Every structure is written in C-alpha cells, then in structure tokens.
C-alpha cells in the first residue's frame, strides 16, 4: 500500500506537478523579475493616471543603479514612516537626481547641476522654491510629474536607493493607454 500521492492517477499527479511548478515560477518572477502595480493617486499625472496598472521590472537595478528620468516604485523612506505611512505602502515617482547631483527648484523650473530640465511630461511648473541640494551617496531625489500635488523629495528629502523596488516600464491597463511608460532618450537638459 503506497502513499496517497502514488494512488492518484498519473494525469492528476502530472497536473499537480505542473501547477506547483507554475506557482513557484510565478512567485520567483514576482519577487525578483517583475510585478504588477496599481496607481492610487494623481501625483504622476499626466504620465500616469489614477487606476493605471503597470508592470514594474526589478532586474535592471541588480545590474546598475537608477538613472535620472526613471520612474521608480519604492518603499517609503524612514521620513515617511515617521509621518505614519505603512511600511508596505509603495510610492511611485520620477528620479530627478542621483548621487552627487545638485537639484534646485527656482522660478517654476527644476535645475539639475545648474541646467534647467526640459520636462515636457509634467502637469504644470512647480509653484515652490527649493534651494540647491546635493544628493548624497546611495540616495535619490524623486518627484511626481504632478509637481504641485506630489508628496515627494521636495517635501520629505532623499530616497535611499535600497528602498527602490523597481522601474515602471509598461502600462497594461486601461486598454486604450497600453504601452511603454517612458523612453529615457526624451529626457534631457537645456
């Protein structure tokens, strides 16, 4: 007399094995390769709208750090945890400055290393000022594309790179907006 497993018909055992393999692969892909995300706020309008569903890829940041212009999903930094945000609440913002960069906001423009950023993707020019700040090692300066309605680095400071989950690369819903999120080649300074 064998185990319950050996008493199952061969096709049921094979189907169960395929199901277990599929579940393990799905878990591995979600943990290390890519995962879906939902946009709950308007902080990234007009690039991303409330209700958009995205694929966030995780592999590229194993190979290189985030770059200026990347749209990143991240866990809240310590400053936001102190304000009462849940540690599992993910944020999404655009990388403006990387380690060593100097970021400044003045006269409705964002400056990166003394040069005005050409930002055709923003909802409107920032209506606030920020003195020049140098981005520390292993940190990022991130902002929402909806500059005047975004809880971002201009409010709470720098984002530790270790908090980055991945990069938003593809919108899969709504159907009429399916497509790649951003081509970094369009991101430039004047």
Image (spheres, rainbow, N blue to C red):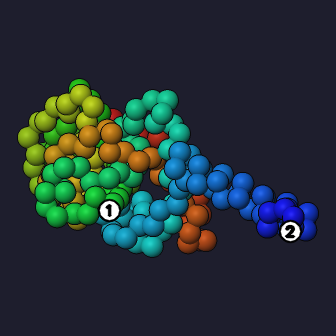
Residue 158 is left or right of residue 91, and the answer is: left
Which of pointers 2 and 1 indicates the residue nearer the eye?
A: 2
32 over 81 or under it: above or below: above
Query: As rendered, which of 19 and 72 lies closer to the eye?
Result: 19
Query: SS class of the residue under badge 2?
Result: loop
Answer whether labels 2 and 1 touch (C-beta < 8 Å): no
The numbered disc on residue 103 is none
Q: Residue furthest right?
A: 10
Residue 29 is left or right of residue 45, and the answer is: right
Residue in view at x 78 percent, y 58 percent: 18
Residue in view at x 56 percent, y 69 percent: 173
In the picture, the quarter occupied by the C terminus is top left
Q: Residue furthest front?
A: 1
- Asked which quadrant contains residue 148, the reply is bottom left
Query: As rendered, which of 143 and 188 lies closer to the eye?
Result: 143
Query: SS class of the residue under badge 1?
Result: loop
Residue in view at x 51 percent, y 66 percent: 53
Residue named by callout 1: 89
187 over 91 or under it: above or below: above
Counting from the top left corner in percent of width and height, residue 12 is at 85, 68
Counting from the top left corner in percent of width and height, residue 69 is at 39, 42
Counting from the top left corner in percent of width and height, residue 72 is at 39, 48
Query: As rendered, which of 76 and 11 lies closer to the eye?
Result: 11
Q: Is residue 1 visible?
A: yes
Residue named by callout 2: 8
Residue 65 is left or right of residue 104, and the answer is: right
In the picture, the quarter occupied by the N terminus is bottom right
Residue in view at x 59 percent, y 58 percent: 179
Real-space Cα distance between discs 2 and 1?
43 Å
Query: As rendered, which of 180 and 163 lies closer to the eye?
Result: 163
Q: Assess disc 2: are there few (<14), some (14-19) or many (≥20) residues with their C-alpha within 10 Å of its C-alpha.
A: few
Q: Is residue 112 visible?
A: no
């Amino acid at each position: 007399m064998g185990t319950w497993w050996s008493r199952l018909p061969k096709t049921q055992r094979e189907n169960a094995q395929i199901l277990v393999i599929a579940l393990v692969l799905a878990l591995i892909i979600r943990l290390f390769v890519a995962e879906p995300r939902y946009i709950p706020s308007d902080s990234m309008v007009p690039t991303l709208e409330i209700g958009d569903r995205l694929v966030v890829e995780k592999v590229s940041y194993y190979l290189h750090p985030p770059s200026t212009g990347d749209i990143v999903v991240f866990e809240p930094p310590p400053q936001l945890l102190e304000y009462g945000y849940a540690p599992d609440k993910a944020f999404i913002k655009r990388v403006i400055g990387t380690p060593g960069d100097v970021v400044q906001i003045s006269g409705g423009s964002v400056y990166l290393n003394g040069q005005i950023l050409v930002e055709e993707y923003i909802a409107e020019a920032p209506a606030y000022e920020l003195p020049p700040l140098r981005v520390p090692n292993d940190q990022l300066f991130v902002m929402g594309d909806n500059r005047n309605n975004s809880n971002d680095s201009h409010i709470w400071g720098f984002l530790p790179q270790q908090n980055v989950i991945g990069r938003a690369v593809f919108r899969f819903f709504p159907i009429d907006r399916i497509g790649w999120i951003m081509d970094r080649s369009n991101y430039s300074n004047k």
